[in-house]
Amino acid sequence: MTQAEVLKIEKSLSKIDKGSFCYTILFKDLSTGKSLKTYVSEKYKGQPSRNYPYWLPVLKKGIGTIIRNFIYLRGKPDYIDADSRFSLGL
């Protein structure tokens, strides 16, 4: 089972969708200690992002939040796929 803990959340203005925000979420893989990250946007090309609602609880809970059963982005083992349908840990 994959598990990671949120270490930092950086909020910035989106470069693609003016007026919306993009979040860089930094994690620690709890089984390997490796650093991981993902990017989540509120909007994508003017439309609500399909994965933003899944990440909203993580953004609200913040640092220390544990996620489980995520998938790695194909070809980028240091990235969590933002389309992962993960579960929240304790």
Image: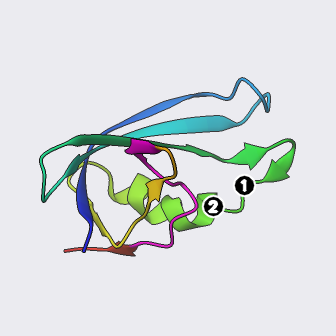
Residue type (three-letter) at the residue carrying disc 2: Asn
**Residue 18, percent from left and from top:** 79, 28
At x 85% / y 51%, what residue is drawn? Answer: 47
Q: CA distance from mark 1 to mark 2?
A: 6 Å
Whether tag 1 and tag 2 are in contact, CB under 8 A, the answer is yes
Q: Which mark is residue 49?
A: 1
**Residue 44, percent from left and from top:** 78, 45
At x 71% / y 36%, what residue is drawn? Answer: 20
Residue in the foreground of this view, choosing between 16 and 60: 16
Asked if the magenta segment contains residue 56, the reply would be no
Quarter of the rendering occupied by the C terminus: bottom left
> On the image, which quarter does residue 31 sit in?
bottom left
Q: Left or right: where does residue 5 sit relative to residue 44?
A: left
Which residue is at the far front?
Answer: 75
Q: Left or right: where does residue 68 sit relative to residue 33?
A: right
Element under label 2?
Answer: loop
Mark 2: give few (<14), some (14-19) or many (20+) Cα within 10 Å.
Answer: some
Residue in the foreground of this view, choosing between 72 and 23: 72
Against 3, residue 17 (above or below) is above
Q: Which residues are magenta?
A: 76-86
Residue position for label 2 = 51
**Residue 30, percent from left and from top:** 14, 57
